[in-house]
Amino acid sequence: MADETPQTTTGATTDATAGQTAEETTAKAAPSRRSVLGWGGAGLALGAAAAGGTAVALRTGGDARPAASAGDAVPFRGAHQAGIATPVQDRLHFASFDVTTSDREALIKVLKEWTAAAERMTAGHEIGDGAFGGQEELPPDDTGEALGLKPSRLTLTFGVGPGLFEKDGKDRFGIKDRRPQALIDLPAFPGDNLDPARSGGDLCVQACADDPQVAVHAIRNLARIGMGKVAIRWSQLGFGKTSSTTPDAQTPRNMMGFKDGTRNVSGTDTAALDKHVWASGKDGAAWMAGGSYLVARRIRMHIETWDRTSLREQEDIFGRDKAQGAPVGKQRERDEPNLKMMKPDSHVRLAHPDSNSGATILRRGYSFTDGTDKLGRLEAGLFFIAYQRDVRDAFVPLQTNLSRNDALNEYIQHVGSAIFAVPPGIEGDDDWWGKGLFA
Ligand code: HEM
């Protein structure tokens, strides 16, 4: 895929919102960026260009067309990866990858190329020489379907799964002793009906954007770049957010019709984020300081059964009313819940930190509908995503409690599961996804 020819570089930047400048015209005559840097080098040089996270295009040899005209870009760089505390976007494409190469250097090369491509895409730019700016003899660097679309607040959040550290008893990449203790193999919970083909994975990328095509384009291109070294194990599209990290915004509703995300860790509550979401160097794995742990669960809903359930029972199950999302006995959504007024098996009562020794997660899930099954039932549910500082005192006790006692269990089934360590954000010009782990 990549041409590795070492060359000299142009490296100038320009404002993507401006039209064709004299500089761009000059750049067009310059050698192609792909022939100039190769993929790894391109990524490293891009750092400064997209550091601001807004529409800034790196001049390519062929053309400096950005995939977006202006605005709406979330900064890619920072102490933490974007896509966790970031205000939740409307759409999701989540991909879990198996690493198919056993060559450590080949894997590192993919991760560097991914970082470079991710930085380009989140800023709203085409990858490398773009969809039609490069050498005609080679496949284009970018597949093109995001051309003309805005950055759409695209965030790409990268994680590593347990299998990267050890698989079938083998320390494939010499990093077995770097596995964080918090990156556990999740225990089996009562009621689990997990499909191995929709579970696990060595790497993950969570793509969130306000435009589904932008999210899908990002995952597709990362898979394309990694071809032969990594392969998508499973992926999930999500069409509607079911959580909120912005308490002032309207809370979205899930497929059961209830407001979902009312009580969540706010993306601006730095004290809560430090306490419950960001891993600290003192937690064990120094390379994870500023990172977080992600649990993904594909939860199928028995929609047709739910739809035949009375409103009273539906509200009892959650412990909140359907209209406002107010807790039992209260008027407004944001009123403080009185857990004792809720049924003992209600979801909110059981999930509340007070019922779980303070266990707290940042929820960032999405509704999904993957058509219908053989019986004509909606293949729908919640693709649950939770971030936390340590799953052992967050998701695990919470799900242990819910899986045993939650009245909601009659209407849902967990059918997919995965856990990933999500490293801290990209900082510095020569940084790349996983650098701290492989250093
Ligand atoms: C299909 C499955 C699920 C549905 C439909 C669902 C729905 C809801 C709804 C409607 C609320 C109330 C509004 C809110 O505060 O956000 C809620 C709260 C909550 N849910 Fe879930 N949920 C599901 C699965 C889970 C799972 C698997 C967990 C964790 C293991 C979880 C953890 C929580 C937490 C922590 C709260 C907030 C409780 C509070 O502090 O008041 N949920 N959920």
Image: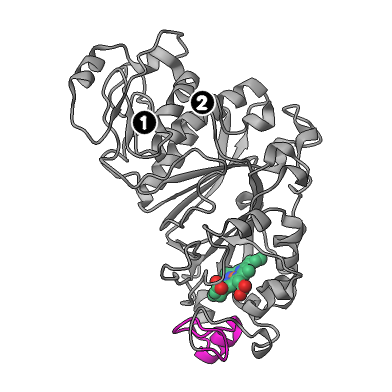
Picture quadrant of residue 216: top left
Residue 62 or residue 325, whichever sits in front: 325
Q: Position of residue 250 (x, y in %)?
A: 41, 70
Tally the marks: 2
Residue 137 or residue 406, whichever sits in front: 406
Precedes in sequence: disc 2 or disc 1 = 1
For badge 1, the amino acid type reads Asp
Query: Which residue is drawn at the image coordinates 45% and 17% (left, top)?
Result: 38
Q: Which residue is mark 1?
A: 142
Query: What residue span does the magenta drawing correspond to?
Result: 307-330
**Compared with residue 203, is residue 306 higher up or lower down, i.e. above or below?**
below
For badge 2, the amino acid type reads Asp
Residue 117 or residue 237, whichever sits in front: 117
- Sort mark 2 into few (<14), some (14-19) or many (20+) by Cα contacts within 10 Å: some
On residue 300, the disc is none
Q: Position of residue 307 (x, y in %)?
A: 48, 82
